[in-house]
Amino acid sequence: MFVQSSERGLLTGLLLSLVLAALLPWLPIPVSLLVLRIISAGLLLLAMVLLWLLLRSLKQRHSQRRFVEDWNRGPDVASAALLADIKGQVLAQRVTVSHLLDISSEQLSTTPLDRSVFATTPTAWPELKQRCLEGRSWQGLIEADGRRLSIFAYPVATEASGFGQLLVLEFSESQGVAPDTAAALLARLPVGMLVLRGRRVVQVNDSFCLLLGATRERVENKTTAEVFGAASPFEQALLQTLPKLMQNAQVETAVELQRHDGRSFWCELVFSALEPGQPQAGLLVLLADASEAKRREESLRQAAVVFDAASDIILVLDAERRIRMANGAFARITGYVTNDVMAKPPRLLFSSKQPAELYEHIFAQVQKQNVWQGEIWCRKKDGTVYPQWTSINAVRNDAGHIVEYVLIASDITERKRAEERLNYQANYDALTELPNRTLFVDRLRQSMSRARREGTNLALLFIDLDRFKNINDSMGHSAGDKLLVSVADALRSCVRESDTIARFGGDEFAVILSPIYGAKNAGTVAQTLLKVLSRPINIDGYDCLVGGSIGISIFPGDGDTPEDLIRNSDAAMYRAKDSGRNTYEFFTAEMQQQALARIGMERDLRYAIERQEFVLNFQPQLGLATGDVIGMEVLVRWESGTRGLVSPGDFISLAEENGQILALGEWVLKEACRQYVIWHREGIAPSYIAVNVSGRQFRTSQFPKLVQSILEETQMPATGLELELTESFLMEDEEHVMRTLGELRAMSVKLSIDDFGTGYSSLSYLKRFPISTLKIDQSFVRDIPGDDEDVAIVSAIIRMAHALKLDVVAEGVETAEQQRFLHELGCHIIQGFHYSRPLSVAQCSEFLREQFERRQAIATVERA
């Protein structure tokens, strides 16, 4: 068996070690037995080491032989290549290599490479060996028979030998590039380069290492699975590429790879066979970072999605203003498909509703300012004209020349409709469809300007319906709304087209008569309006009589501004109401003084509560059965520092109108409860105090909570409080009324109906509502027992109250005859000047003490 010299040395050393170990105990050497044993053991150990080295060498030799045999059977047997060990001994060679090198096969097999192939370039072999020992490839040039040959060498590994002990040298005729120049070119390539032999990486350049974030040592002479990962996209691309390379010169693809630090990036791959049509001979792979290109591609894709999915029209025009691109919204909105408008100017979309020169004007502005935006009227494919908000922007190149235009537009039909609706709502009354106060004032201002220019007059008529509140309260808001619509229609029929009629709010209307020729004409129109308003208006089968009061102011005599004319006609309207209603009055200087007085009172009233100018009075209520004081009605008086004592009739209605009744009502209720608690602690308090509640107070959702809070704050017993409610506002919102009354009764507060019989009295609400007392209005009591009608009404109310088990209070009792007659009818309680006038707090306290002492005296006599 062929054995190399190194293996013969190992075998000789092994035999000598075994012989010495066997003979040593028999040799006559004067040494101790222990020393002999140690030496013998050392020789045996040495023999074992030598045996292991021998076996390892034989194994490597066997593995090397198998690798050589496999290499000789490889797919590239036609290439000019040889296989050698690191010492330069050729182990195998292709049949064409000796012919290319002009060296015989025998000489290549017996002569080391440094003396055969590299004899003319002695520095190349040591450099090649060193690079292969480091696991890197080497490329260079040699001279052979006057020709320049290119050599590409790379290390390989067998199963038993270390990496770099064997190397492959591939030879090819050079194209004249020096080895150092070729290496420099490869290093400077801006893309990564990878050379594959089968699945093994034999060479890479610096750009590849930079791209992958790896060193050459971690890449070269490794398999692609080791470099990129066994299941990497590169491996999949490689499998898909090999069949194509049998037919194509190169294959391009893009995959997402992973750098060695774990980061991913998109990479463009170009596969080429080193031998055309023979990918098994080797592959050249070029790699380029495509992350930025991928991002640009994704941005373009997203832009395309946005472009097509945008709800607004987007058109791209070329420099000659021809349509080059249109998105999906363009077709949805206009009805045109892209082919209808491609390469055509957007002028075809413009409607004739605007001037023809607008088109050129728009693009002239874009030329100057790069942008134009505004509202234009466009035409759809079906001929429909619609408003469009359009923005056109110019796109310029680096030289400043326009290369394209971008047109963005939206259909604003719905927005225009919404604006019209908002404009209508802002200027017209939703119920009657008449102009509202805002539009009326604007038209009045315009009419006044025209009257100044033309030297004419105009009249402003302010109309207030006389009995609308009664109808609205008794028949409900729905009937009231229908009545207002009917009144508006009736008023329209009385004025000219040049005149303006408006609803100011509630039951107030105003008319502008422009022009007029003398105040007499305004009076004639006012008479016509009153005649129309006096006619019955049928609402839900009932004939309603309304009537009205009209105030008239004339321009320019009665004011220089719209506000002056409105204020003065309003003052004249109040004079008409005071004059008996269903009439009209012209504004006078006296009315102006009254209007100013009203404004002054409203101002003083605003500060009266802060200045504590209000005081409470109490009017006793007599129980006819016992002759004792049953309760006290709470009355409020205004003792103004500048006006003196002001009657409630002069300020209560004003407080209702301007909302100050809320603060005033809260103050009255709290002060009344505080005073009752004082009397209660003294033991002289009546059974209850009755406090009037304003309709405006009662309508607030927080009223029950306010009452509860005052009761808790003042420690007022709820059973001692009676709230007097007017029947008119109990009819407005039944659900709210029922809820509020229920909450008040749950507190044990008593409830009474004030001025019963003066409004739309309903027996059904007396049954449903938790009412405890009815108060007969003094208008029915004043003329009894002499007036038969009043007697009938009062008798009916008392009998009805008895049937419903309600208490009855008669107001305004001023004579003994009235008191006696009411007592005979079964009235429980009376109140009026005959028994007692309203008393101040001090007077009422004294009155209650006297009543208490009288009852005490009577009780003493009875006990005696």
Image (spheres, helix red, strand yellow):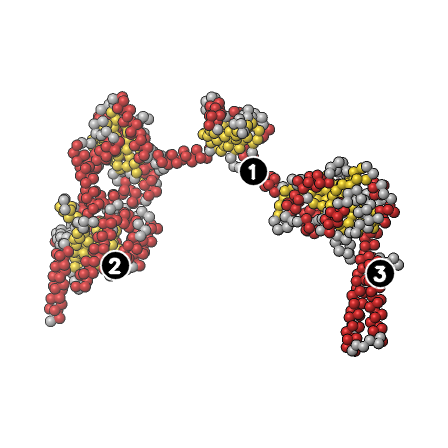
- In this view, the residue farthest toward the right is 1
152 shown above or below 463? below
Residue at point 80% right, 70% down?
A: 44
Q: How many marks?
A: 3
Local SS, label 1:
helix
Viewer-nearest residue: 16 or 465 = 16
Q: Quadrant of the N terminus?
A: bottom right
Mark 2 lies on residue = 713
Mark 1 lies on residue = 303
Residue at point 25% right, 26% down?
A: 458
| Image coordinates for residue 241, horizontal then vertical, percent | 73, 43
Q: Amino acid at mark 2?
A: Glu
Viewer-nearest residue: 537 or 597 = 597
Q: Amino acid at mark 1?
A: Ala
Identify the image quadrant of residue 434. Answer: top left
Q: CA distance from mark 1 to mark 3?
A: 77 Å
Identify the image quadrant of residue 633. Answer: bottom left
- Residue 355 horizontal side relative to residue 55, left or right: left
- Mark closer to the chain start, 2 or 3: 3
Q: CA distance from mark 2 to mark 1?
A: 69 Å
Foreground label between 2 and 3: 3
Viewer-nearest residue: 440 or 835 = 440
Mark 3 lies on residue = 8
Foreground label between 2 and 1: 1
Q: Quadrant of the C terminus?
A: bottom left
Q: Are marks 1 and 3 in contact (CB under 8 Å)?
A: no
**Neighbours of disc 1 within 10 Å: few (<14), some (14-19), many (20+):** few
Residue at point 21% right, 37% down?
A: 574
Local SS, label 3:
helix
Q: CA distance from mark 2 to mark 3?
A: 122 Å
| Image coordinates for residue 184, horizontal then vertical, percent | 68, 40
Residue 38, labelled with which disc? none
